[in-house]
Image (tube, helix red, strand yellow):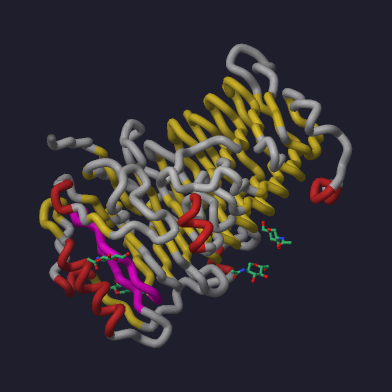
Amino acid sequence: MRLRFFTLVCLCCCWFVSSEGETVSCSKIVPLGFRSGNISITEFGGVGDGRTLNTKAFREAIYRIQHLPRVGGTLLYVPPGVYLTEPFNLTSHMTLFLAAGAVIMATQDSSNWPLIAPLPSYGRGRELPGGRYMSFMHGNGVQDVVKMGQLMDKEMCGGISGDRDLFSLPDQTLLNFNVVIRFVTILAPRDSPNTDGIDPDSSSNVCIEDSYISTGDDLVAVKSGWDEYGIAYGLPSSNITIRRVSGSSPFAGIAVGSETSGGVENVLAEHINLYKMGIGIHIKTNSGRGGFIKNITVSHVYMEEARKGIRISGDVGGHPDDKFDPNALPLVKGVTIKNVWGVKVLQAGLIQGVKNSPFTDICLYDINLRGVTGPRNPPWKCSDVSGFAHQVSPWPCSELSSNQQGSCANYS
Ligand SMILES: *[C@@H]1O[C@H](CO)[C@@H](O)[C@H](O)[C@H]1NC(C)=O
Ligand SMILES: *[C@@H]1O[C@H](CO)[C@@H](O)[C@H](O)[C@H]1NC(C)=O
Ligand SMILES: *[C@@H]1O[C@H](CO)[C@@H](O)[C@H](O)[C@H]1NC(C)=O
Ligand SMILES: *[C@@H]1O[C@H](CO)[C@@H](O)[C@H](O)[C@H]1NC(C)=O
C-alpha cells in the first residue's frame, strides 16, 4: 500500500529582527560574515522557478564546499526564488544563506526520499524498525554550520510526505556554537506526523535563534539517543541555546527528550512565543532511558491557547525494542522555568517523576498560567518530584514547597 501524507514543508527566510546594541545573539560569539568563499546555487544550475528540481545543484554545491575547502569556510548563496529539491546533506564549515525572497521547498514526490542507516544511538528508525528518513536538510557529524535567512515579505510552501524531521543535527562534538540556525522559517502542516522542527541530537554548542517554526510535532526538541543504544553510544547534548523562537504546534514548543539516553545538559531557552499549542514546555523521559537531564533553563515564555502549560514527565515515549533495561532510570535534576505568562491554558502543570528516581531541583518562578474560562484552571498534578516554587499561579503542588534548596537556592 502506498501512503501519501501531503505534508507541506516550507523553509524560507523570515522576519528580520534588526538587532542593535543590547540584543544578545549567536553572532556575538560566531561572526556570521566570516566566510572567505562565496558560491551561488546558480553556478551549479540552480533554478528558482518553483518547478525545477534542484537536488543535483544543492548536492554538487555542497560537495564542492566539502572537497574544495576554503580557509574560513564557504557561503552558499541562494538568490531570490523558490528552489524545489529533494533532501540534501549539509557539510562542515558552511553557511547556507537564503537571500530575501529565497525559499527552499521540499519536493512533493516522496518516492525518492532517502532512507538512511539508523543512528547508532537509536538502533533503529524512530517510528519504524529499519532505516530512517533523512532530514530535509541533514547534518551528521558536522561542525561550523550556519543556516541563515533574510527578510522576506511573502511566504510560499511546497510539500513532502510525512514521517521525518525537518532538521536533525546529530553528533556535533566541537567548540563554541558550531552550529548556528537563525532567521529561518520552518513550516509543516499541523496534521503532518513526526515533523519536528529542529532536533539537536547528541549535539553540543548549537544556537537556534530568531526563527519561526510551525509544525505537526515538537518545534525544537533536544535529544541524545534511545534506551540501550543511546546509553551505549553515550554522547550527550550540551550547551544548547534557543532564543527568540516563535511558533505553533499540537505538540510541544520547547522540548527536551524523550530520547535522552546519552544525557542532556546546559540548555537555555528564552524569549519563546507560542500559540495554539499542545504543551508549551515539555521535558520528557522514561524508565529504560537512563541518561540525565540536568541544568535546563527556560525563561520568558508567552503562550496563548495550550492544552498544558508545563509538563515534566517520566513515562513518555516508547522503547526501540524489548532489550531495554527497565532499571536504567533517568536522572532529572536542575530544571528552572521562570517568567512564563500563559492565557487560555487548559491545565497549568503536570510533573510526574520516576518512582525510584524522583526529579529534584525543579525550580518554578514567576509563572502565571490562566485558564480558559477564568483566571484559574485545574490544579497542578505532581508526583516523585521536589523543588521550589515562587510566585506561581495557579499555585503548584505541595511537593514544590517554598523550601529553597539545591539549585533552586540561587533564586533571589
Ligand atoms: C555572495 O555572492 C552573491 C552573488 O553570487 C552576492 O549577491 C552576495 O552579496 C555575496 N555574499 C557575500 C556575503 O559576499
Ligand atoms: C547523507 O548522509 C547520510 C549519513 O548521515 C548518508 O547515509 C547519505 O548517503 C548521505 N546522502 C548523500 C546524498 O550524500
Ligand atoms: C559546555 O559549556 C561548559 C561551560 O561553558 C564547558 O565547560 C563545556 O566544556 C562545554 N561543553 C562542550 C561539550 O563543549
Ligand atoms: C548551566 O547552563 C547554563 C546555560 O543555561 C550555563 O551558562 C551554565 O554554565 C551551566 N552551569 C553549569 C554548572 O554547567
- x and y percent of residue 320 in the render? 41, 46
Judge from the rendering whether residue 217 lies leftward or rightward of residue 45; answer left or right.
right
Q: Main secondary structure of the magenta part?
A: strand
Residue at 70% across, 30% down: 383
Nearest the eye: 213 or 383? 383
Residue at 66% across, 32% down: 351
Q: How many marks?
A: 0
75 in the magenta segment: yes
- x and y percent of residue 85 in the render? 19, 56
Judge from the rendering whether residue 192 lies leftward or rightward of residue 297; answer left or right.
left
Residue at 28% across, 57% down: 102
**Residue 135 visible here:** yes
Vertically, is 245 above or below 353?
below
> Which quarter of the rendering shows the N terminus?
top left
Rendered-image quarter of ligand 1: bottom left
Image quarter of residue 369: top right
**Residue 17 visible here:** no
92 in the magenta segment: yes
Q: For the magenta stretch, what is the residue range? A: 74-93
Residue at 64% across, 58% down: 266
In this view, the residue farthest toward the top is 373
Judge from the rendering whether residue 254 lies leftward or rightward of residue 98; answer left or right.
right
Vertically, is 72 above or below 31?
below
- x and y percent of residue 90 in the render? 33, 67
Nearest the eye: 316 or 90? 316
Vertically, is 214 above or below 174?
above
Nearest the eye: 379 or 304? 379
In this view, the residue farthest toward the right is 403
- x and y percent of residue 132 in the render? 30, 52
Image quarter of residue 192: top left
